[in-house]
Image (spheres, rainbow, N blue to C red):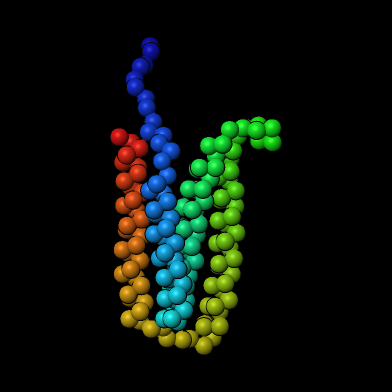
Amino acid sequence: MAHHHNHTHGHSHDTGNIKVAFFINLLFTIIEIIGGVLTNSVAILSDAVHDLGDSLSLGLAWYFQNYSKKKRSPSFSYGYGRFSLLGAIINSIVLVVGSIFIFIEAIPRLIAPQQPETEGVMLLAILGVIFNGAAVLRLKKEQVLMNA
């Protein structure tokens, strides 16, 4: 018994929304690093490392999506499509190094706690919701367009 149906995928290779989400996240990462230092907050700095990983993931996805469109060559007989793995490796290294930095900052504070500047931390939290929400909306817009 044959089963026939239309099966289409919206494989749009438009990376415009990923690019916008990358720059939104990168901008907020920079704001958060500066804010974490100014507010004396390891929590904000650790979230900045997390956001740096998100930014890096988006940036590498954007870059390698464009790079992977190159045709195969004698050196890359299967083409360049597997370069996304390189992005994952780079992202992993950045997150591990960032985590080590956070441990170095946090361990002395367990021995001698320091008070962060709470008003600044709250402001950064509100900004985080706004920036991350904007990035998610841009990516959702791309997903809706791809599935249409």
Residue 43 makes an appearance in the image? no
Residue in the picture at 46% in, 58% down:
55
Residue extending furthest right? Answer: 75
The percent coordinates of residue 70 (x first, y second) are 56, 36
Q: Nearer the viewer, residue 8 or 22?
A: 22
Q: Nearer the viewer, residue 148 or 110?
A: 148
Residue 24 vs residue 66: left or right? left
Say which quadrant the N terminus sits in: top left
Residue 129 vs residue 112: left or right? left
Residue in the picture at 35% in, 44% down:
142
Residue in the picture at 38% in, 83% down:
117
Instruction: Check the image and report above or below for 80 versus 123.
Output: above
Say which quadrant the C terminus sits in: top left
Instruction: Check the image and report above or below for 75 versus 51.
Output: above
Residue extending furthest top? Answer: 1
Residue in the picture at 42% in, 58% down:
23
Instruction: Check the image and report above or below for 118 versus 139.
Output: below
Choose top left, top right, bottom left or bottom right for residue 22. bottom left
Residue 116 vs residue 86: left or right? left
Residue 111 makes an appearance in the image? yes
Circle count:
0
The percent coordinates of residue 75 (x first, y second) are 69, 36
The percent coordinates of residue 76 (x first, y second) are 66, 35
The percent coordinates of residue 9 (x first, y second) are 39, 31
Residue 126 vs residue 71: left or right? left
